[in-house]
Image (spheres, helix red, strand yellow):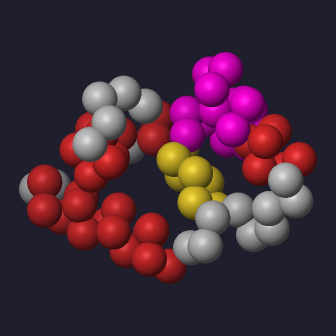
Amino acid sequence: MSDSNVHDRIAKLVAENNVLLFMKGTPLFPQCGFSSKAVQMLQSAGAANVVTVNVLEDPELREGIKVYSNWPTI
């Protein structure tokens, strides 16, 4: 998949969801401490309809979100 396709996929996900979390793992089985804390904070804040994306399932998305967000790590 090209970089622009990944960027378009990410942009679509962001546009379609009020609360979206790109994370390692799932809310029930987070794969890193940051992902676990992020889920806990969203739940504590009463966020409803949180959509999560497990970046460990898609290496292109995992790299693409770094470029999209201009943040070097996930």
Which residue lies at the image location 80% right of the left edge and 67% below the top edge?
48
Quadrant in the rendering for residue 5? bottom left
Residue 65 located left or right of residue 46: left
- Which residue ends up furthest to the top in the rendered image? 33
Quadrant in the rendering for residue 63? top left
- Which residue ends up furthest to the bottom in the rendered image? 16
Q: Quadrant of the image for the N terminus?
A: bottom left
In this rendering, does residue 11 appear at all? Answer: yes
Which residue lies at the image location 85% right of the left edge and 53% below the top edge?
45
Identify the magenta region: 23-38
Which residue lies at the image location 72% right of the left edge and 30% below the top edge?
36
Taking depth in this image into account, of 15 and 63 the one nearest to the observer is: 15
Which residue lies at the image location 58% right of the left edge and 51% below the top edge?
21
- Residue 15 in the image: state x and y as whole percent: 44, 77
Quadrant in the rendering for residue 74? top left
Looking at the picture, does residue 69 appear above or below residue 31? below
Looking at the picture, does residue 40 appear above or below residue 4? above
Taking depth in this image into account, of 18 and 26 the one nearest to the observer is: 18
Residue 56 located left or right of residue 38: left
The verdict on residue 53 being magenta is: no
* Number of residue marks: 0
- Residue 47 in the image: state x and y as whole percent: 80, 62
In this rendering, does residue 59 appear at all? Answer: no
- Residue 8 in the image: state x and y as whole percent: 25, 69
The verdict on residue 30 being magenta is: yes
